[in-house]
Amino acid sequence: MLCYARLAARVIKEILTDDFVLGVTSVDDELFVLLHRHDTQVTVYSINDYKLLRHLNVPGFEPDVNNYITSCVRHKCLYMSDRDNCFIHRYDLANSATSKWSVSGKPCGLSVTPSGNLLVTCQYPGSSNKLVELNADSGRRMREVVLQSDVVYPWHSVQLTTGQFVVCHSDGYTKDGLHRVCVVGDDGVVTLSYGGQYGSEVGQLYGPCHLAVDKGRQVIFVADEWNDRVVLLSPSLEFVRCLSERMPRCHRLYLHEATRRLFVVTPRTGDRSVTVIKL
């Protein structure tokens, strides 16, 4: 964690795309960028030199600003959430086969658990919000974690090596309610939290909407969208630092641990770029 407190992060690349970017992930040596369009929704780049390789089409996937993407290296596949239609789309990279899983509630953020299953952050308007774990191959529901009542509008969650979950939640850009990152147990009860009422001082967030976790150091990167910054937190949710570069409206993150690069989606160039930061 100390290395993050002292290290000067620097921008090394801006990947320019031809549409609004909804998320970034990778499998092996390929980078996958989800775009806001109705065909060839995923653009594939080399993870090494960012050269454009090809485009992927996900039949039936309807892009929206609240949809997310993640990937599983073990199963060689992509997952995309379709919040408004309550589906998860799975794309098999080996044979381009696709499948669609129905999810109760509105699925938002996606991540892969240490056991290789898919963790879906679901918003249930008028009811308890939940984390839903789905089998990686079949989409069968393995378990649900009902979040305590003040965790409203959860956007993304990641399971930690401790078995607990880190969750970010806020009511978008509104100044009402709580803007927090929380650690919750498998009973959905908050054990640690960072943030509260909106603000930009240390201990405050404004629109936290996406997370990336360094699995080795368990440092948590937070896309603090309406504060135009990425916040780094310790495993105990103590403030470490903000990245030195300003990140206007950052709303998606992806950490490529092998190369120590953080991919940040910002509207810096008309909502059509991915900023690559060397850590």
Image (cartoon, grey):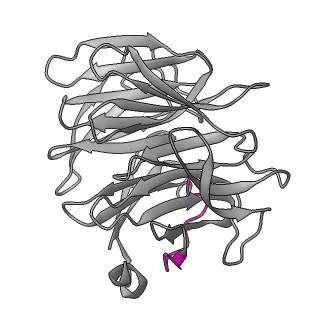
Q: Percent x, y for residue 101?
A: 43, 12
Residue at 42% from the left image edge and 55% from the top image edge: 212
Q: Percent x, y for residue 105?
A: 62, 20
Compared across the picture, whether 81 is left or right of 12 comes to right
Residue at 75% from the left image edge and 44% from the top image edge: 150
Q: Percent x, y for residue 260?
A: 26, 67
Q: Quadrant of residue 92?
A: top left
Compared across the picture, whether 238 is left or right of 61 comes to right
Q: Quadrant of residue 3?
A: bottom left
Direction front: furthest residue: 187
**137 or 25: which is nearer to us?**
137
Direction right: furthest residue: 176
* Residue 60 visible, this angle: no
Q: Quick check: is 248 in the magenta stretch?
A: yes
Magenta highlight range: 239-252
Up-down relation of residue 152 to residue 89 (above or below): below
Q: Quadrant of residue 24?
A: top left
The chief SS type of the magenta part is: loop
